[in-house]
Image (tube, rainbow, N blue to C red):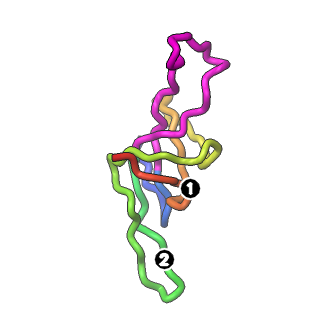
Amino acid sequence: MDIKPLADRVVVKPLEAEAKTKGGIVLPDTAKEKPQEGKIVAVGKGRILDNGSLQSLEVKVGDKVLYGKYSGNEITTKDGEELLIMREEDILAIIK
């Protein structure tokens, strides 16, 4: 499924939640934290400013990003892939 976000929105594929703690304890699915890292899979054209000009986004496809725990809207594609659609302002940082 090909998704093209509009304006300043991005499509993020969340990374898998950790299955073990740092101490080696295996976590069941119900105890896993909601992931806060993901990979950008699609970006919109950018934000339209008050003067009518287009400001391009800082993130690009392939960037690994950190976002708020409850940011974005969850969607599931026909293939069963879970993705998030969020505004660029919901992204906290780009992970290098």
Residue 61 appears at what percent x and percent y? 34, 51
Q: Quadrant of residue 45?
A: bottom left
Q: Residue at x 50, y 59 (%)?
A: 88
Residue 5 appears at what percent x and percent y? 47, 56
What mark, if any, has residue 30 been given in the picture?
Answer: none
Residue 52 in the image: above or below residue 31: below
Verify whether residue 27 appears in magenta. Answer: yes
Verify whether residue 58 appears in magenta. Answer: no
Q: Quadrant of residue 60?
A: bottom left
Residue at image mark 2: 48
- The quadrant the N terminus occupies is top left
Residue at image mark 1: 90
Residue 50 in the image: above or below residue 87: below
- Pick the residue in front: 80 or 93: 93
For label 2, the SS is strand
Highlighted magenta segment, given as a residue range:
11-39
For label 1, the SS is helix
User: Do we see residue 71 in this rendering?
Assistant: yes
